[in-house]
Structures are given as C-alpha cells and as structure tokens.
Image: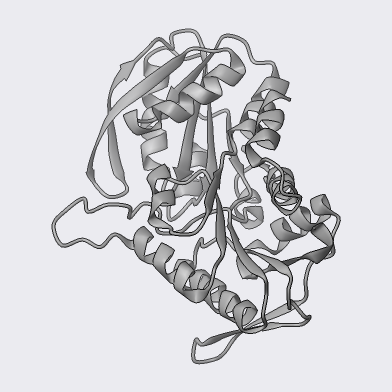
Amino acid sequence: MVKDTVIFALTSSVELANEIAEQIGLPLGNCDVKHFADGEIIVELGESVRGKHVYIVQSTCAPVSSNLMELLIAIDACKRASAATINCVMPYFGYARQDRKARPRQPITSKLVADLLEKAGASRVITMELHATQIQGFFNIPADDISALSIIGKYFKEKNLDDIVVVSPDHGGTTRARKLAEMLHAPIAIIDKRRPKPNVAEAMNLIGEVDGKTAIIVDDIVDTAGTLISGVDMLYRMGAKEVYASCVHGVLSGPAIERLDNSRIVEFICTNTIPQKSKQALLPKMKVLSVGLILGQTIKQMEENKSVSEILTQLEAQ
C-alpha cells in the first residue's frame, strides 16, 4: 500500500522526486547525502524504512560515476535498515550506450552497472527510454523501462502543427519514430548516417519525403548534438518547411548548447529525466517537459498491485 511507501531523492533528481511524491500524495523522505573532501560519499537516512517499500530517485547523469555511487550507497543504507523492497527509479540510466562490445576488448558497462545495482540490494529498477531495450535482460530482478513518448506526443498534438513528418535520426530509432508518428497520425522518414567515431556522425541519405513539411526529429538521447545538427541541415536541404527536434534525455555535453542555439531548429524539446534549468537559461528555444506525472502514476500502480502497462496506455491515449 502507498502508506508503506517512502520516496528518497538523491543529488541529481531532487526536483523530479518532489514531483513524483506529489503525484502519489506523499512527502519526500528525509535523507542526507554528503560528499567529503577526499571524494568519499555517505548517504544517511533520516527516518525508519523498516518493512517499507523504498523508492530511490536518481538519474545517473553527469557526474555519472559519482551519481551512480550515491545510488549504490543509498541502496546499501536501505538494505541495512531492513527495507522490505528497494526500488531504484533511474529516469536516465548512465552507461546505457555501452551495451555491447563494438570493438575487441571493450567492456559491456551497462551490464556491469546492472550487476552492481543487484549486488548492492536493489529489488527493482525503473528506467525511462533505455538506449537499448535489451538492457532489461541484463537484470535478474524486475526492470521496467517506461516510455516518455506519450509526453512528447501530447505536446506536439497541442501545438496543432500542419503537414507533419516524424523523422528518425538513424535506423536504430525507427521504432521510436513510428510510435510517435502513430500518435500524431503522420508519416515517417529515416536519416541514413554513418558514425566514423564516438560522438561523430555524418548524415548520408534520407529515406522518405520531407519537402514542404514540418519535420519532427525524435531521439532518445542528444549528447553533443553533432548528429542532430547534421540531420537538421539535411532536412532543410531536402525542402523541409520547419524542423523541430525532440528527445527524452537531453545530456547536452560540450558544444551542444552552442550548436543548438546557432542551428535552424525552431524548438528543441526534451524532458527533465536530467535536470535542465541551468541549460534552459542558455537556450531560449529549449522546452522541458516533465516526466513526474508518468513516473508517479507508475509507482502508484505498482504499490496498488495494478497493471503498469494499463496506466501507460491511458496516458498515451490522452
């Protein structure tokens, strides 16, 4: 039951955790995270969790390893305080892009992170829009990957744009683009690109028609925005009337803000799986959508032993 639920926020996700707690109708749990001068971290719980269902909200965004370590230590604290279940709510799952051996002698770090969370004592992991859905299979505990496309789809529906085409920035994102296109009753196009090295991509060809249309690029992650800007330039060359860009996780590293600000993108839409306030102040064309509602409703369904997919279907239909 919800009355036996405690929600804790760690460093990276305090505002989002407050939204989630508000959706469920609970106050945020009391915990204290300290970083010592030598870099060590301690997480101290300020209330009893004995027999409680604990939800720890923490995106493992930059600084990735520090935020991951906070989460592992918080899990250990809850385990040693006799929590009934320990549920990790990771809106952004760091290291998700290291999901396979792309070259000889490379690690599969997302599998390592899954093992660390399990070993620390996590009972369940809740993520959003994993870069590779097969990462769910890296866990031997329940792992729920929640889609944020309903939030992005609702936003574009309310804009009432004319003659839309949804664009996938690569072949791997085709399923995501098709899902958004179905919500908007629009066709899709696919950018054919090659990636000569990490964080570098070149748009090569376009599959589909964008001439005279309003193009909406949708991706899971925008990091340095090099791939995105390359795709935007191609769409305009191919005759697109306007180009909007959207993603779930706005990592926005290095030159990303400058690139987006200087681009011909009409608007850049992302969610708050990663905190964006400081970046939003530097990028007027940036719109941040909240995932607090969908995560709050997901946790509520879990605590009431109801179907999670049912509530997600309802949100997508709105």
Is residue 110 found left or right of 130 in the rendered image?
left
**The N terminus lies in quadrant:** bottom right
- 176 up-or-down from 148: above or below: above
Q: Tell me, yes or no, if residue 287 can be seen here.
A: no
Residue at 42 percent across and 63 percent down: it is: 114
The picture quadrant where one finds residue 202 is: top left
Front one among 258 and 81: 81
Residue at 50 percent across and 70 percent down: it is: 68
Expressed as whole percent of the image width and height from the top left, the position of residue 58 reads: 60, 63
Expressed as whole percent of the image width and height from the top left, the position of residue 236 reads: 42, 19
- 176 up-or-down from 221: above or below: above
Front one among 300 and 179: 300
Front one among 84 and 297: 84
Residue at 51 percent across and 60 percent down: it is: 61
Expressed as whole percent of the image width and height from the top left, the position of residue 207 reads: 33, 16
The picture quadrant where one finds residue 5 is: bottom right
Is residue 100 found left or right of 122 in the rendered image?
left
Expressed as whole percent of the image width and height from the top left, the position of residue 286 reads: 62, 40
**The C terminus lies in quadrant:** top right
Colour approach in the figure: one colour
Residue at 38 percent across and 55 percent down: it is: 138
- 238 up-or-down from 2: above or below: above
Q: Tell me, yes or no, if residue 175 can be seen here.
A: yes
The picture quadrant where one finds residue 315 is: top right
- 228 up-or-down from 80: above or below: above
Is residue 201 found left or right of 266 in the rendered image?
left
Is residue 150 found left or right of 103 in the rendered image?
right
Q: How many marks?
A: 0
